[in-house]
Amino acid sequence: MTDISSVSFGADILPLFTRSDIEHMNAFGVRLGQHEWMSQPSNAKNVYGYLTGQSKPCMPLGGPYWSQEQLDLFALWMKTGYKP
């Protein structure tokens, strides 16, 4: 189980995105690889919506889609303050 006090963008969230995900989304102004951008609550919640499929299309486009464990980790990162 993940220690909630240690969930961070650099160690836990950034590695969930592939280089291709980051490069592709940069073209749309979505900075998946930048903590400063991702730690803005509206940006993180928007990304999370696409990752979960609550927003369409579900991302990453065509899969592979994130596991529930990965989604839970992302949600925990948001809930515990978007730590770098």
Image (spheres, rainbow, N blue to C red):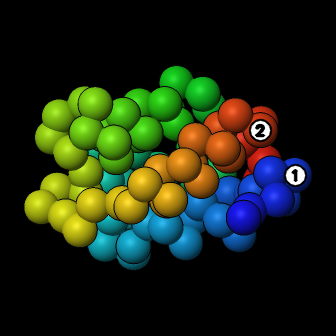
SS category of the residue bearing label 2: loop
**Residue 75: horizontal and vertical position, in percent?**
58, 41
Question: Disc 1 residue type?
Answer: Ser
Which badge, 1 or 2, comes first in the chain's sequence? 1
Say few, some or many: other residues with alpha carbon within 10 Å of mark 1 (under 14 / 14 to 19 / 20 or more).
few
> Residue 65, relative to residue 30: is it above or below?
below
Which quadrant does the N terminus fall into?
A: bottom right
40 to the left or right of 70: right
Q: Residue at image x 54%, y 49%?
A: 72
Of 66 and 45, the residue lying toward us? 66
**Residue 27: horizontal and vertical position, in percent?**
28, 52
Q: Residue at image x 43%, y 39%?
A: 48
Query: Can I make out residue 31 in this image?
Result: yes
Say few, some or many: other residues with alpha carbon within 10 Å of mark 2 (under 14 / 14 to 19 / 20 or more).
few
**Residue 69: horizontal and vertical position, in percent?**
50, 59
Of 37 and 11, the residue lying toward us? 11
- Say which residue label 1 marks: 5
Q: Residue at image x 55%, y 72%?
A: 15
How much space separates mark 1 and mark 2, taking CA atoms?
A: 8 Å
Question: Disc 2 residue type?
Answer: Thr
**Residue 80: horizontal and vertical position, in percent?**
77, 38
28 to the left or right of 80: left
Q: How many marks?
A: 2
Determine whether label 1 and label 2 are within 8 Å by CB: yes
Q: Which mark is residue 80?
A: 2
SS category of the residue bearing label 1: helix
> Residue 45, relative to residue 25: is it above or below?
above
Residue extending furthest toward the top: 42
Residue extending furthest toward the front: 1
Query: Can I make out residue 10 in this image?
Result: no
